[in-house]
Structure formats: structure tokens, C-alpha cells
Amino acid sequence: MKVVILAGGLGTRISELTKIVPKPMIKILGKPIIHRIIDHYVANGFKEFYVALGYKGALIKKYFKSCKLNKDIKVECIDTGKNTMTGGRIKRLKKYLNKTFMVSYGDSLSSVNLKKLLAYHKKKNKLVTLTAVRPPARFGVIKIAGDKVKYFREKNSLDAGWINGGYFVMKPAFLKYIKGDNTFLEQEPLKKMTKKKELIAFKHKGFWQCMDTLRDRKILEKKIKNKEHLE
């Protein structure tokens, strides 16, 4: 099965590093995050990848030309335009996507069981399945009466609802709902799927962490050192 990795964004919230390399090439403990994403898919039996390039895409292409992957692993890097949005990048790969396929963002890691995700998608038989995750805890929770703190607790992920963690499974028929380069996957196309009851969520309660900022990068490295990414 084919896996699309969205790797073309500007990564402005971590511009300290993306001035030099594209966001998917930022290293987590010495290895680019995009390579770690591919490793996770490979461990779940996936071998064919299409990387949707944009900003500084030549650096990603150069990396995969030079790095050593198992000979049965295919990584094809395709320019999908510097200013193309997430939905548009997938649409540009339409000619490669004639069967059910996976889609991942190029800036988050997870321990989601991809085999179970795919089986769930097939069982539900909808156009799109997304992986729902709990957002990482960031702030403590307090309750105030007047100026007195009546309640204090460190916030945990269960205090918040579910969010889109990426790791999609899609049927080719979904592509007709993406108009073109300026279409955000997360806007009109998925909203239409919601109205048509063709979007379902696979709940993942284990490890998930995005990398939007330098702080997120440090958290990722700490969790990987502590082997929390296996949970």
C-alpha cells in the first residue's frame, strides 16, 4: 500500500531551524523526523512512500538519494509546489493513488498501530479515516474563588478532547473533493466528509507528539530517550 507524506510546508513556528532545512529534515536524536516516520511505517509492513515536496524540497530529495534504505523500500520524492496547501499536495499525486492509500504529516511521531488503523478503515468502509489523539498537556489547571486558588492540578491529556493526529487512510474517490493547490485538507474536503458521514476516527490513546516548536522538539527527544514513543 502507498503512503503519502506531506513534507512541503514552511514550518514558520520553528523558523530557527527551518531557515536552514525543511521541517521534515529537522533531526530528532540525529535522525530526520521524516525518516523516523518512515521507519514506523516500515515496522508495520509498509514499503512504498511518496513524499510531497515543497519548501526546500531539494534537501529532502538529496537525503533520500544518499541514505541507505532496505532495497525493498521505495521512497519517491515529488515536487508538489512551494505554495501548495495540504489538500492540493495530495491532489497533485492523484495519478499514483488508484487504490486505498495512507497519508501522514511530515512533522509528528506516534506509536499508532498502523495495521489496526487500516483494518478499522476497511471494516467501516468510509472514504476517510483519521487518527484521533489526545493533545499533549501544556498547562496546569486551577480554580479561583476571588483571589484564592481553590484547586490546582497539573493538566494531563485527558483534560482535553480529541484532535486530528494525522495518520489518515483514504480511498481514491475522496480526491474529487479536493479542488486544487489552494485547498487545505483540513478545511473544505474533510468538512464535506463530515456532512456526508464519510469521515471516521480511529482513537489512539498511546504516544503521539507533533513538532511545531523548538520546545516540541526537546519533548520528542526526551520521550524517545525514555522509550515513551513505544507506548
Image (cartoon, rainbow, N blue to C red):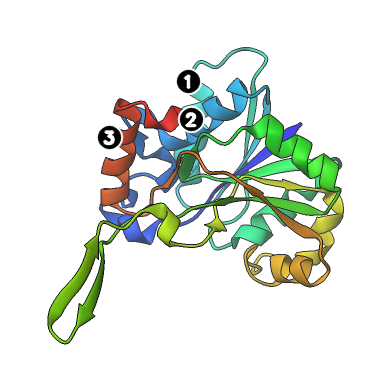
In-image side of 214 versus 199 (left or right): left
Nearer the N terminus, badge 3 or badge 1? 1
Q: Position of residue 170 (x, y in %)?
A: 76, 48
Q: Residues within 10 Å of mark 2 (few under 14, many from 20)?
A: many
Q: CA distance from mark 1 to mark 2?
A: 10 Å
The residue that mark 1 highlights is: 67
Q: Is residue 61 left or right of residue 209?
A: right
- Residue 97 visible in the picture: no
Where residue 213 sits, quadrant-wise, is bottom left
Q: On the image, numbered disc 3 is attached to which residue?
A: 222
Front-most of residues 14 and 223: 223
Residue 122, x across and y down, in percent: 83, 41
Sequence-wise, which precedes: disc 1 or disc 2?
Answer: 2
**Callout 3 secondary element:** helix
| Crowding at mark 3 (Cα within 10 Å: few <14, some 14-19, many 20+) | some
Q: Residue at x 48, y 21 (%)?
A: 66
Q: Nearer the viewer, mark 3 or mark 1?
A: 3
Q: Of 163 and 64, which appears nearest the observer?
A: 163
Are the residues at dot 1 and dot 2 in contact (C-beta closer than 8 Å)? Answer: yes
Quarter assignment of residue 149: bottom left
Q: Amino acid at mark 1?
A: Cys
Residue that appears at 29% across and 42% down: 219
Residue at x 66% of width, y 65% of height: 181
Q: Is residue 157 left or right of residue 169?
A: left
Q: Which mark is residue 225?
A: none
**In x, y percent, where is residue 146?**
16, 87
The label on residue 35 is 2
Q: What amino acid type is highlighted by mark number 3?
A: Lys
Outermost residue to the top: 71
